[in-house]
Image: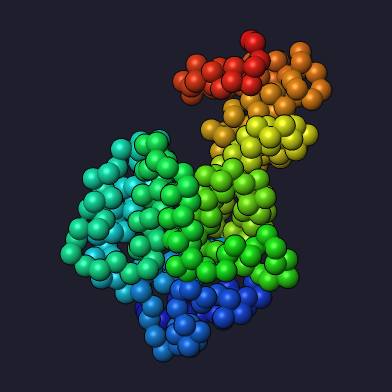
Amino acid sequence: MELYQVGKLIKEYRRRKGISQEALSFGICSTVTLSRIETEKELPSKRIIELLFERLGYTAPLNNAAITESEIIRYNIESLLEQKINKRDFEFAELLEQYTNDGSKMNKFEVQIFLLYSAIFALHHNANKTLLAKKLNYALKLTHSDYQDVLNNKEKDFHFSKSELLIFFYIALIQSSIPMLEYIAKYIDKNIMDSIAKAKYHTMILTHLCRLYTENKKYLEAIETSLFGATKCAEYGKILYLPPLVMYRGIATYFSKNKNEGLKIINDSFKMFSYFGTEIEQRSIVKLYGIEL
């Protein structure tokens, strides 16, 4: 077994995507370190392998990664946190405490992950959104100090790992930033090769983008995004995101085109929601828009 084969893969994937060593290593490790990894002179840690592959858009091969006991503990806690969030269970204060209490100092990547999950916890416990945005900005700058230029600097290629994209996403969500969500949706569609991550995050972001378009009365954009998102739900097999996409398309249709057609689409979405047991909650959301059912 070749312990250093991971370096060959990184070099091959980096060249395929036309990414320089400087761009790939930025905020993760030095360019010299990446060069040593690619030439099989150095075996990177699990966290560095993960981040480099995520920036390249691929799933990281972690079977040969060098990993410490504290990294194993925190990696397992991260898995538990993600499982809870996927189940919409946001009571994980104890897990966050365990993440910081194993006795070893967190590296910047672990600090970044901790701040991300702490922000998700706080968002669902009525935290101050301005303070949360500041924390998440700090977290992203630990590895991507120039990320705020993505909307202004059209000539530079930016490369993000999954954790960086998630932090970017929550900043956009807290600030209700349509341009940021548009950027993230396009980035994932173009750059992420990991089919599981792409399926999950692309549909999630398109759904939130559709909601923001609707809230800001950008109804044509909401309808277009809903239809595009529905095709992605079918492509990825992510049917859980289909009902809200249909609901927001119904609301947008109600206000921009035809009230009767909009009501029909909304009621169709409720039939989908009822299958998942969330119809009552969605009816209250529709009423917030002043629509009588």
Q: Is residue 241 above or below residue 193?
A: above
Q: Nearer the viewer, residue 206 or 131?
A: 131
Q: Residue at x 42, y 42 (%)?
A: 128
**Residue 5 location (% of width, % of height):** 44, 79
Quarter holding residue 64: bottom left
Q: Is residue 165 visible?
A: yes
Q: Residue at x 71, y 15 (%)?
A: 264
Quadrant containing the N terminus is bottom left
**Residue 70 location (% of width, % of height):** 24, 65
Q: Residue at x 46, y 74 (%)?
A: 28
Q: Is residue 29 left or right of residue 84?
A: right
Q: Is residue 89 left or right of residue 189?
A: left
Q: Is residue 139 above or below residue 253?
A: below
Q: Residue at x 21, y 67 (%)?
A: 104
Q: Is residue 31 left or right of residue 249?
A: left
Q: Is residue 284 above or below residue 57?
A: above
Q: Report the residue that reaches farthest toward the right.
A: 257
**Residue 9 location (% of width, % of height):** 51, 75
